[in-house]
């Protein structure tokens, strides 16, 4: 796998920087993809050699055409773009392989996206690629663009070549690409690389992420994904790219509402939706998830156009009080602060601005301000030692010289080490100013709220990156072999659901805090166990046929004597068999009752893409009502486990509320780390619930109250 | 009908529809890859074969035929 990754990186370099390109299957028919791809390459003024390959034409657009790629006389053709129908692309790819071409883009549709027949064609392409050590982007993609002046490759059927910039954009949707290009064009946003990767039959978003991570022309990586086929791989790639390059990765992952939680075999299963898992996994990997294209580009321009801010302290310069207050509200609600001006700054502002101006932060240069007041205020803000970033707000009054102010902002921003952002509020009259700002890489936002969000994201990313490490802790007291034996024994009769007693035995092998107690098969045995562990005790029905014990009244608490144990024995049996007449009852589990604790839930759910996912939350029988839960993809660092706890409302309760003692949070962290290890060591575990985990006072640990496991079987 | 006769007549239809020099059409020529037929021309080829051989073919299956050899074998089932 590693060899294949390396090969793809090598071949990607040629895809983006080819010295010659063959367009295989092109023709003269305007408005068709085969024609327009060639047309696009020529219009963009590709710096290399172009070889049209067409079975019918002797020349296209004045360039000699070849019937087959094998007919091209030159020894080296760097890149082939296949635009034949899917029925024959494999023949073209085979010839490319024979020719020694290693790098290919397959534009044509008609593959996996049309069903089984198309998938078979895709597999055929992959086989050919493997045979010749080739790599390809696609099929079913818009293509690829590299704006570098020494290449100027538009190997796509996008309408126009975008401007040069430092944003690398990848998309699983080709159609979205065209919309994004049009949107970016209007806002003067340029790209380093622009890639539609289509069906990702060979080169995936993970390969492209690594590539852009190493690309000197790319400063920020944007991605649109419809499905995450290898979540664990994506997380690993993101972590590595961020650690090595410091480049932010922003992703829109669509389908938030498309998938619901799995069927409720366990509480964890019913609480763990695909989108929540994606959110948690992205957060852990340092990926910035965005909800829409506008948000994504709002943040991207903040990352690429201006220096990163050093602190959360901003200065707001406005010509209107209302927008100044709106911006202040937006800033504060996003964790930013208003910088406190020095006496020197205040003196400068007092001198430069009229008496009616507000010289505190936010600075109101007032409605009749022209560029001179703006310039003075902005310069003073830049020079103030407490200011880390400057926000310029403008509303179009009759005397406001919009274009001059915009020009002044672009001039004053040059060479600054602090970022400046602008919000020229309106649309028609301010358009001339906005255009100038955009052309000169001053991040502009229609709304102050978007401006503050963008600043906050850049600030936080750069602060977090210094502390970001994925150091996994050592965990002692684990007996994997013993757990394996217990697992095998529990699964011996082909079942997939492992009830409480056996699940707890497995958890004990991983050092998790199991309750004192035993399975009793007679009432007398139950009394003996109770007397051994000490009253009060809890008794629970144990049966492969009963999953939700409380619902069948199969649990009794606070049993304080032998007589109570015996009476409860009879009642539990009667209740269980009344609810599930055919149930086979193995016995009753007698455990020591825990008092004075908080109940939380821990769980494992195996996600098809992200692997084992851990859950933490406020527990008990109403967990699915409160849904105060958090997720983390295993394996976790200690910080991630603690982070899972702290992001819930339950964490406030655990700290101690209304006179209650703080609880042993460290024991929860330990349990999460051990569960993560268990899930990694035993891939057959599909779901696991510990509900509740009784968390005692700080220093006193925690105890498992109930647990069950669901295992993948071959059935 | 003899397959050689079918082959000769198939090549004539192909040459006419695709305006290709008959010398460029071999027995295993792929209509798209070797002869450059687009989707419209593929339909015209099917119509051309039906007219030439006075047959009615299953359109979907006929359009799946990829090359001269397969076309000959396909048409042979009808004549």
Image: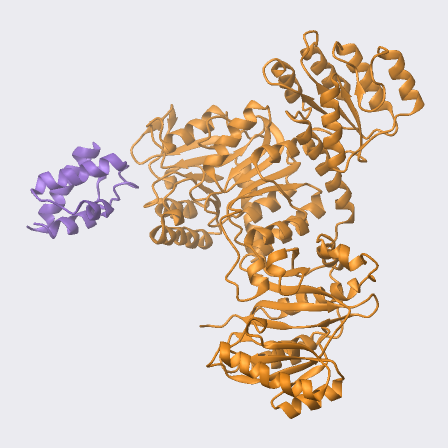
Where A364 sits versus A659, above or below? above
Quarter in which the N terminus of chain A is drawn:
bottom right
- Residue at the farthest top position: A399
Residue in the picture at 24% in, 44% down: B29
Where A24 sits versus A404, above or below? below
Q: Which chain is orange?
A: A
Residue in the picture at 6% in, 50% down: B1
Q: Quadrant of residue A564?
A: bottom right
Q: Quadrant of residue B36?
A: top left
Q: Nearer the viewer, residue A479 or A360?
A: A360
Q: Nearer the viewer, residue A533 or A504?
A: A533
- Residue at the farthest bottom position: A524
What percent of the width, then of the height, locates residue A557?
68, 76
Residue A77 visible to an observer of this rendering: no
Q: Quadrant of residue A677?
A: bottom right
Q: Which chain is purple?
A: B
Residue A233 visible to an observer of this rendering: yes
Where A516 sits versus A138, above or below? below
On the picture, is A468 further left or further right than A38? right
């Amino acid at each position: 796998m590693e060899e294949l990754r390396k090969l793809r990186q090598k071949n990607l370099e040629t895809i983006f920087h080819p010295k010659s390109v063959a367009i295989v299957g092109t023709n003269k028919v305007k408005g068709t993809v085969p024609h327009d791809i060639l047309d696009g390459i020529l219009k963009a003024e590709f710096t290399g050699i172009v070889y049209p390959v067409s079975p019918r034409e002797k020349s296209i657009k004045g360039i000699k055409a070849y019937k087959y790629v094998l007919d091209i006389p030159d020894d080296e053709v760097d890149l082939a773009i296949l635009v034949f129908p899917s029925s024959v692309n494999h023949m073209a790819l085979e010839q490319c392989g024979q020719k020694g071409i290693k790098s290919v883009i397959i534009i044509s549709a008609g593959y996996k996206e049309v069903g089984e027949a198309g998938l078979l064609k895709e597999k055929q392409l992959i086989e050919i690629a493997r045979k010749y050590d080739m790599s390809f982007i696609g099929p079913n993609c818009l293509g690829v663009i590299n704006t570098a002046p020494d290449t100027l490759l538009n190997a796509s059927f996008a309408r126009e070549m975008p401007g040069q910039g430092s944003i690398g954009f990848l998309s699983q949707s080709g159609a979205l690409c065209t919309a994004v290009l049009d949107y970016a064009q209007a806002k003067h946003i340029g790209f380093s690389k622009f890639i539609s990767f289509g069906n990702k039959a060979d080169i995936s978003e993970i390969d492209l992420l690594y590539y852009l991570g190493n690309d000197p022309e790319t400063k920020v990586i944007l991605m649109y994904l419809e499905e995450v086929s290898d979540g664990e791989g994506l997380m690993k790639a993101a972590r590595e790219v961020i650690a090595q390059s410091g480049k932010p990765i922003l992703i829109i992952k669509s389908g938030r509402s498309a998938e619901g939680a799995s069927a409720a075999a366990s509480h964890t299963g019913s609480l763990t939706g695909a989108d929540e898992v994606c959110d948690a996994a992205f957060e852990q990997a340092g990926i910035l998830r965005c909800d829409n294209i506008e948000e994504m580009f709002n943040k991207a321009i903040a990352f690429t156009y201006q220096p990163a801010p050093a602190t959360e302290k901003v200065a707001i310069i406005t010509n209107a009080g209302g927008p100044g207050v709106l911006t202040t509200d937006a800033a504060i609600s996003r964790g930013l602060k208003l910088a406190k001006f020095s006496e020197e700054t205040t003196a400068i502002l007092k001198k430069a601005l009229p008496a009616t101006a507000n010289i505190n932060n936010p600075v109101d240069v007032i409605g009749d301000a022209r560029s001179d007041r703006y310039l003075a205020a902005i310069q003073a803000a830049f020079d103030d030692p407490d200011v880390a970033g400057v926000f310029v707000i403008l509303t179009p009054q009759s005397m406001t010289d919009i274009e001059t102010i915009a020009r002044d902002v672009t001039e004053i921003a040059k060479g600054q080490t602090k970022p400046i952002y602008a919000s020229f509020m309106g649309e028609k009259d301010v358009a001339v100013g906005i255009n100038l700002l955009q052309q000169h890489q001053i991040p502009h936002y229609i709304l102050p709220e978007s401006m503050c969000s963008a600043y906050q994201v850049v600030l936080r990313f750069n602060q977090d990156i210094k502390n970001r490490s994925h150091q996994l802790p050592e965990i002692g007291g684990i007996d994997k072999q013993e757990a394996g034996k217990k697992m095998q024994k529990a699964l011996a009769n082909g079942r997939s659901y492992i009830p409480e007693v056996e699940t707890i035995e497995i958890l004990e092998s991983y050092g998790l805090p199991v309750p004192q107690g035993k399975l009793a098969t007679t009432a007398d045995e139950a009394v003996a166990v109770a007397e051994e562990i000490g009253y009060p005790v809890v008794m629970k029905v144990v049966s492969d046929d009963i999953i939700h014990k409380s619902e069948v009244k199969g649990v009794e608490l606070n049993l304080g004597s032998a007589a109570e144990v015996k009476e409860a024995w009879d009642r539990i049996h009667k209740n269980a068999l009344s609810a599930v007449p055919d149930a086979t009852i193995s016995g009753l589990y007698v455990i020591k009752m825990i008092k004075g604790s908080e109940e939380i839930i821990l769980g494992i759910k195996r996600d098809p893409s992200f692997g084992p996912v851990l859950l933490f939350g406020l527990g008990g029988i109403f967990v699915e009502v409160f849904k105060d839960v958090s997720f983390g993809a295993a394996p976790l660092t200690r910080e991630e486990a603690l982070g899972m706890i702290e992001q819930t409302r339950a964490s406030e309760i655990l700290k101690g509320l209304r006179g209650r003692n703080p609880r042993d949070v460290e024991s929860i962290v330990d349990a999460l780390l051990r569960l993560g290890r268990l899930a990694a060591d035993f891939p057959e575990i599909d779901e696991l619930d510990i509900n509740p985990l009784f968390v005692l006072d700080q220093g006193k640990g925690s105890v498992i109250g109930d647990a069950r496991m669901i295992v993948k079987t071959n059935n | 009908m003899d397959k050689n006769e079918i082959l000769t007549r198939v090549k004539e239809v192909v040459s006419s529809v695709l305006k290709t020099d008959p010398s460029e059409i071999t027995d295993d020529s792929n209509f798209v890859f070797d002869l450059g037929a687009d989707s419209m021309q593929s339909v015209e080829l099917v119509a051309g074969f039906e007219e030439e051989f006075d047959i009615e073919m299953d359109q979907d299956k006929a359009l799946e035929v990829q090359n001269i050899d397969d076309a000959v074998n396909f048409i042979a089932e009808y004549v």
